[in-house]
Amino acid sequence: MSLWTHLGYLVRRLDRRRAERDLDDELRAHLDLEIEGNVAAGMSMEEAIRAARRKLGSIAIAREDARAVWQLPLLEAVWRDLRHAARVLRARPAYATAAVVSLALGIGVCTAVFSAVDAVVLRPLPYPGADRIVELREVAGDGHRMRVAEANYQDVRARTGVFDSVAEYAVAVETVTGGTWPVRAVVVSATRDLFRVFRIHPIVGRTLLPEESTAAAPPVALVSHDFWRRALGARPELGGVRVEGESYAVVGVMPPGFDFPGRGDVWVARERLGGGGARTAHNWSVVGRLRDGVSLEQARADVSAVAVRLKKELGEGTDAADMALIRLQDQIVGDAGRALWILLGAVGLLLLIAVANVANLMLAQAAARQKEIALRAALGATRPRLVRQFVTEALLLALLGAGLGVLLAVAGVDLLLGLDRAALPRAGEISIDLRALAFTAGLSIAVAVALGLVTALRGSGVDLRASVAEAGGQRTAGAARARLRKGLVVAQVALAFTLLTGAGLLARSFAGLIAVDPGFRGAGAVAIDLSVTATTTLTKTDPAAQERVRRLYVELMGRIRELPGVTAVGAANALPLGGDGANGTFLIDDDRSRTGDAEYRVASPGYFQTMQIPLLRGRLFGPGDIASAPHVAVVSQSMARAIWPDGDAIGQRIQFGNMDGDSRLLNVVGIVGDVRDSGLDAAFRPTVYASTMQRPPPPTLSVVVRARADPLGLIPELRAVLQRLDPELPAEIRTLEQIAASTLDGRRFSLVLLAVFAVVAFVLALTGIYGVTAYSVGQRTREIGIRVALGARPRAVLGMVVGEGAVMALGGVAVGAAAALALARLIASWLYGVGPGDPITFVVVGLALAGAAVAACWVPARRAVRVDPIVALRAD
Amino acid sequence: MTERRRERERIDLLQGTLDLLILRTLRPGPAHGHRIAHSIEETSGDVLRVDHGSLYPALQRLERRGWITAEWGTSENNRRARYYRLTAAGRKQLGAESTRWEQLAQAIARVLAAPERGEV
């Protein structure tokens, strides 16, 4: 055959619609000719048509067969299989939904966790040759690792040749001004080689010059891309900033994402900090890049040898018995890496369970479709053809599951990162990217092949032998398999019960905590956290400076009070829920033998009204409580009860001078309600409030502003007030509700994580029960038929099938209850207001799970009831 | 009665022989599907039975291999019909297939005609 005929044929055949029309016309013409012939031979018209039809066979079949010849074989077949599979799934929505949701959950959590493992552990840090970057640590005689002393760093640097470049740095949170508004920022003081170690170049400007690396040089700074945008308005002309009051020229902006050593905002020359201190002052972090050709092992040996020599020379002069090099990635990822791997293992197990469940579902389907399969086999479908159909069906399920799973994973990653970004290193790099999608694709293909093969082998061929064997009395293999299936379901129910109970306990704790009265009203107020250390050198002995700060505070609160919409303003050195206020021991009546322990707060006269902390007895700070008047204190109710249980606290006197250096006695004038100091779940702490008008002003102050309307709307005006009053004053503004919510971050994280797993386990367990029950009903169609034929009522059949599921569910609940008690004891410290054995949680979860399990059995049970004994008995 | 017996005596075509018979039928000249089927049946003295349902897949198969081509024409009683015609390749294929078939038939005949021996 010539190439041209072949091509011509292909071209004609590509015009698919025409080809189909031709074929239809041709078949019709054939039929007509046959009918005419028959009529001519003397048949009646009706007879002629019937005979012609019989001879040509069903036109549809003839057409399909003819078409099959010119279809592109494999692709067409796959497409046809897919369409058939889609029809099968559409016709069985319960089965399709259960299977797809199971796979979606399994694949979704796997994808989400993989994306975290990939971003945090697998992918190298985003620097060129990142695996060559190491962190140097001193190792003490007892093996624990420490930061490095300056002199040790210098000696190691001088004596070893393993580094291409090496730098030391120290990190501090400092006040940076000169930008949009003053901020507390992470300032990294580093030697200029830091940027050589990372081989990183600024996107604007330059890094430090050699002549800038001295204490005497005019100070310069580099800023992070984030800081540049956030605080400097991303202006191309860089200008300058002030760090703790000292001016720095900004000479460069680092590329986006560079924030070494984590959340770094500003990099300045290490030399500004002066000498490094003693050889036992572990003030410095050291990071280096290994020289090309030096392996990590060689470098470790070399550095260790230097350290051992140093120790020999210096003896007690150094703490470093040895020195260690840690891959920077390991240092940054730390324990989170192992935790993530464990998590990936756990979700992998969930996926395996999901696949096992779906396999059961498919086997149940295969059993239910035995007639269809037999028919197709009889019509000439070969074994590979049937296997392909099953694999295609599995592929379709896996694809649907993967698609849905990716959506779940995207939502899940967003959810977890939104909950607590700080919980994980490199969290900013986590996303569902191409690598994660490739992982998902591979996973779903593996799932599809596994599912398809299991079903095809068990559903299309081997099962026949197995059922014959079972009929012949060899029940062991089948019974063992059934036991395994049921065991799996019991384990799943147990797992679901355990996780649901854990999540339930945490949810009840969470709800309890949210309902806890913090002792103040959070809604409708914002807090401004101020730090005056940058603008004023505040010492306890400098009355002029103290007066200046006090006047600043008074002026600020006065101006804020005048803003429209502000209803109250007050301030204290530490707010409730933060747990970061000072506390200590005070003397009762200045008597050294009578002491008490309390939180110490300095509050402004309007503080209690603004926070809406109720006055229980006595009075609050008044206009008469000025510096020259007797000093007064307001105490909390728990304080009054703890110190003066029998008498009246009001009129009593205490001395709390160790807090602020002022040993004048405090006269208790009022008792206020308790507030939750270190968290909603913490017990009340005895608290002493002194007045900002009498005591030395604190260096940090939180000003609380209560607004008539939405407090967030006030923030720009508050910024403007601060800017006008003192452009150097760093301030952070948050609503009280944000502060309260952030104290629950850790809990919310564990609650959501556990809840997600619990829901996944729950759905899997239900799918498992449904699948196993459906399978067993499918297998026992004949038995059920016999029972019905012998007079079993539908109720009894229903009870038998549901009972079987209920037994599995109850077994799972029993095992789960034991496991849940153990888990609850493990998380007892996270619980609030509920005991680890909380009967309500256990009963509700148990009932819900058992109820859902019975419901999951209901569908196949209904099918069993509808079994027609005649059909069932003829099934063989 | 004779009609029924004949029906019973008719033989289903062996797998693969339909292609050969189609090619042979087309040697004198073009024909449409219906004619091809009846021509085979008539020529065989109504012994061979052509499954009309499997005729068209065979025609498609032969066309695909380039042994026949098809075009629309008008039949003897003024019907539109698709006429099939042997190509040069088809003619060559017919020759080869015929030879092969004859060899096969002779071989089978020899086996059937062989003198019987005792059981081994």
Image (cartoon, helix red, strand yellow):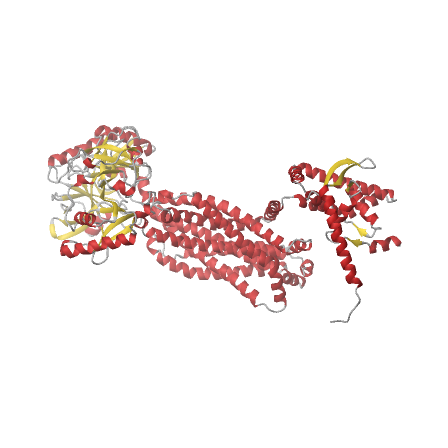
Question: Which quarter of the rendered picture does the C terminus of chain A lie within?
Answer: bottom right
> Which residue: 20% across, 53% down?
A306
Whether residue A795 is visible, yes or no, is no
Could you tell whether A277 is left or right of A326 in the image? left
Q: Dividing the picture into quarters, in which one does residue A213 lie? A: top left
Q: Nearer the viewer, residue B120 or A261?
A: B120
Of A585 and A210, the residue lying toward us: A210
In the depicted structure, whether residue B85 falls above or below residue B47: above
Where is residue A501 drawn, in percent x and y? 42, 55
Q: Is residue A155 left or right of residue A464?
A: left
Please state the horizontal and vertical placement of residue B44, each as a whole percent of the image.
Answer: 82, 50
Where is residue A456 drawn, in percent x and y? 58, 56
Say if residue A129 shows up in the picture: yes
The N terminus of chain A: image quadrant:
top right
**Label tally:** 0
Residue A839 horizontal/vertical position (percent): 41, 57
* Towards the viewer: A213 or A611: A213
Q: Residue B50 or A703: which is nearer the viewer?
A: B50
In the picture provided, is A737 more to the left or to the right than A546?
right
